[in-house]
């Protein structure tokens, strides 16, 4: 690497591309004490390309087929953990042998980190109703996702209106719902329960339910996926999709490169972990 590398390039270079490191990764899988691989994946931007209209997002045919193949392989358990509502992400992936979590891991199948999910749903409904009345901007969309809500203002074109929307949302949540809190994202405000639970806790929840020791691997492109990368470090395998700074151990460029990782796992990676020639107990 020459001296002209910029900061962005350095950030990319400090986290290796996983597809260049499959020998090292294969070695890690062959020598782990774990008996199974737990493979967690984000949905949008990981299995499915980002699209302007979130309701149109779907996994690529290749990613869907490889997940199906992997879900039938011995030695690997798969979960898709999305910011979408649980039913939404389950329907979009549509594979029975895969587990799902929605709302950034707050919405689990048959369990909940919330003390009273129905009360949370009622609070979210109240806040959404009030926001529908108070935000009178046609390009702002309020999405009720059950135990969370997202206020989208990507299509609002002036900064003053965006700031006003953010302020209304934060004021309404502060006034009406002390058990909720707001977090700002790219042209969105998320409204969610004020509890200490993120995608990292959700992945740990999936791993802890296994009777066999699992090696966690997680692939995702979101800021919320960074919680997982930190949670599974240093032994787990974190894979950031994209070129941002990340706490992951590896990175891939895009959704197509995720396909190549899944293909490698299906062809060789999982066999390294469960194969007869490794040193696993
Ligand atoms: Mg994503």
Image (tube, rainbow, N blue to C red):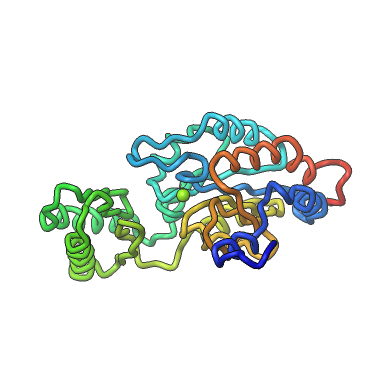
Q: From the viewer's perspective, is residue 150 above or below residue 78?
A: below
Side of 80 relative to 212 (left or right): left
Residue found 89% across the figure and 43% down from its top: 277
Is residue 170 visible to the viewer in this orientation of the structure? yes
Q: From the viewer's perspective, is residue 63 above or below residue 29?
A: above
In the picture, residue 274 is in which quadrant?
top right
Is residue 247 visible to the viewer in this orientation of the structure? no
Residue found 34% across the figure and 38% down from its top: 55
Residue found 57% across the figure and 65% down from its top: 6
Quadrant where the N terminus lies?
A: bottom right
Percent x, y of residue 111: 46, 52
Query: Residue 43 or 199: which is nearer the viewer?
Result: 43
Percent x, y of residue 165: 19, 61
Residue found 57% across the figure and 50% down from its top: 219
Side of 86 relative to 221 (left or right): left
The number of numbered discs placed on residues in the rendered structure image is 0
Query: Residue 19 or 270: which is nearer the viewer?
Result: 19
In the picture, residue 76 is in which quadrant?
top right
């Amino acid at each position: 690497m020459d001296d002209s590398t910029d900061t962005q390039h350095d950030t990319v270079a400090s986290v290796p591309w996983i597809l260049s490191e499959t020998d090292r990764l294969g070695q890690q899988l062959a020598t782990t004490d774990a008996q199974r691989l737990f493979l967690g994946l984000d949905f949008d931007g990981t299995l499915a390309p980002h699209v302007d209209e979130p309701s149109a997002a779907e996994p690529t045919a290749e990613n869907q087929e490889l997940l199906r193949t992997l879900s039938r392989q011995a030695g690997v358990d798969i979960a898709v953990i999305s910011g979408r509502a649980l039913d939404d992400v389950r329907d979009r992936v549509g594979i029975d042998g895969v587990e799902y979590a929605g709302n950034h891991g707050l919405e689990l199948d048959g369990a909940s980190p919330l003390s009273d999910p129905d009360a949370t749903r009622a609070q979210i409904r109240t806040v959404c109703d009030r926001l529908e009345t108070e935000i009178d901007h046609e390009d702002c969309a309020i999405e009720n996702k059950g135990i969370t809500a997202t206020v989208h203002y990507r299509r609002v074109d002036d900064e003053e209106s965006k700031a006003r929307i953010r302020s209304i949302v934060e004021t309404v949540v502060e006034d009406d719902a002390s058990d909720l809190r707001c977090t700002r994202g790219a042209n969105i405000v998320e409204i969610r329960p004020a509890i200490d639970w993120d995608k990292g806790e959700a992945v740990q929840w999936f791993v802890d339910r296994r009777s066999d020791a699992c090696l966690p691997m997680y692939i995702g492109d979101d800021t919320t996926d960074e919680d997982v990368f930190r949670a599974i470090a240093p032994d787990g395998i974190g894979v950031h999709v994209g070129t941002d700074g990340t706490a992951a151990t590896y990175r891939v460029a895009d959704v197509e490169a995720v396909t190549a990782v899944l293909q490698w796992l299906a062809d060789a990676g999982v066999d390294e972990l469960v194969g007869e020639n490794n040193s696993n107990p």
